Amino acid sequence: MLSEKDLLNILDKKEKVDIEFKEAKRGVPKSIYETYSSFANTNGGIIILGVKEIKEGMAVKYEISGVENANTIISDFWNTINSGKVNRNILKDADIYSLTVQGVELVIMHIPRALYNQKPIYIGGNPYAGTFKRNFEGDYRCTKESVNSMIRDSFHDAGDNEIIEWLDIDDLDKNTIAVYRTRFRNNNEGHIYEELSDKDFLTKMGAYRIDKKRNIEGITSAGVLMFGKTETFNEIFHNVNLDYRDETNLFGDMRWSDRIIENGLWEKNLYNFITKVYPKLISEFPVPFQMKNSLQRNDETKLHVATREALVNSVIHADFKEESCSILVIKKENFISYSNPGLLRIPIEQIYQGGVSVTRNITLQKLFRFIGFGESAGSGYDKILAPSRAEGFQVPELYENQDMRTTNLKLWIVKKEHGALSGALSGALSGALEKPNHMLNVKEQMVLNVIREFPNLNRKKIFEKTKIPLTSLDRYLDKLIALDLIQKKGSRRTVSYNAKSIDIQ
């Protein structure tokens, strides 16, 4: 629950992407249900009733005006939201309460981000007319494509097990299947699937499916994505581009030094794309000599595993039914960026905590896991975070683009002392962070890294680079200031943040 101090701090920072002020002197504003929908369909937020917006020329300020009867407003809101005004009520009793500030009553509403299987949250009976999302401009009505994306995501296993009846085994690339099966045998010695025919093997793996209830059978979406011939892939997934670019070692007007894209020289499918791209991503990684056990050499680092996991994640979590759909992997000097269509199905904070995974393409995940690509459900992002936790790399940056409906990951492949932080500075900072009262969580470290790399950033710019919800971002900034790691300068609209110098003895 917010305190009076919290409320005054929010008021001083004005309305933000996850904060909405409404006057609501005598009753519930009609627009509140649009904001409820927009917060629920985006990243959640707080609605504060009893605050008046005052425009002074180009400037806007907010003034506490209060509500006349908080209990009546709260009761009216509950009655309306439970009577069919919206399609689903995702609020708990504790999410709505009154708060006395400066002698007047306000009503506070905490709107959570809806679960993937609850979306879309909409007003009235038509999701295409009543679904809203949130950006810096406020609440906006969703496009048909955005609503369709949420509806698809509301089904847990709707990703890649659809049967395409008119396709058969001949529509898949035999060489891709053969190479996959060789890798499968090497990774699963003595497995009972080894002796199966291709059709039986693909059926066991989910790439071919028989639906006795509907009396149909055929190649699944996962089968086409993983093993399809180029023409089959493009027939079923004409909207999907697979694109890898190496943007290192450039000179002159070069845009990339290497690229993998459909060119007629390889069969376009995910198996070929992933197995072509991964060796290029790790080609310059240092490889230590270690013995995993007395018989097997282990020449992988945590960075190798994180890079492979991030690459596989970009396809097993992709929404291949988006109208504009690209799996885009870009190798830079200091990092690798991954982008896939489809928003996250669970909040970023939950992903960073680990242990939970809601995969869109369960069959693809199974196909890759059997050949050593990808981890078991819930542990994948822990592997992606491992280099930053154990080997001195910056924390990976995971964020969503709500407008483009994409998920993006930046994985750092150069340690801090070789990148944004000098070796001495990194050591000093690490020493400071070892003290118990200076421990930072993943998000706080991300904010600090961004401020160090980009001096004089304001709050909005930090949000754009980190995609951390503003209420959480404010808390992290306050903690970093309290720890004397950053400093705040300016006031109100001119506030910016800089990292403080560390005294290195």
Image: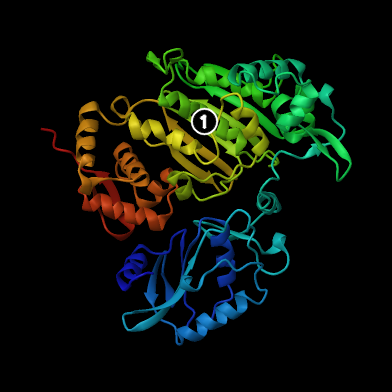
Q: Quick one: quadrant of the C terminus?
A: top left
Q: Give the class, few, some or many, for how many residues have Cα within 10 Å of label 1's Cα (few <14, many ≥20).
A: many
Q: Is residue 390 visible?
A: yes
Q: Residue at x 41, y 49 (%)?
A: 463
- Relative to 335, say whether 499 is above or below: below
- Relative to 182, say whether 480 is above or below: below
Q: Residue at x 45, y 15 (%)?
A: 251
| Along the viewing direction, whichever of 219 and 245 lies nearer the viewer | 219
Q: How many marks?
A: 1
Residue under numbered circle 1: 309
- Relative to 13, say whether 447 is above or below: above
In the current view of this chain or complex, which residue is farthest to the left?
505
Residue 370 appears left or right of 169? left
Q: Quadrant of residue 270?
A: top right
Residue 498 appears left or right of 463? left
Q: Residue at x 72, y 19 (%)?
A: 177
| Along the viewing direction, whichever of 192 and 467 lies nearer the viewer | 192
Q: Is residue 139 visible?
A: no
x then y, percent, for residue 300: 44, 20
x then y, percent, for residue 38: 57, 61
Q: Quick one: quadrant of the N terminus?
A: bottom left
| Along the viewing direction, whichever of 430 and 231 lies nearer the viewer | 430
Looking at numbered disc 1 in the image, what kind of residue is underneath it? Glu
- Relative to 361, say whether 183 is above or below: above
For label 1, the SS is helix
x then y, percent, for residue 92: 52, 70
x then y, percent, for residue 78: 56, 78
Q: Quadrant of residue 492?
A: bottom left
Q: Quadrant of residue 390?
A: top left
| Along the viewing direction, whichever of 488 and 184 lies nearer the viewer | 184
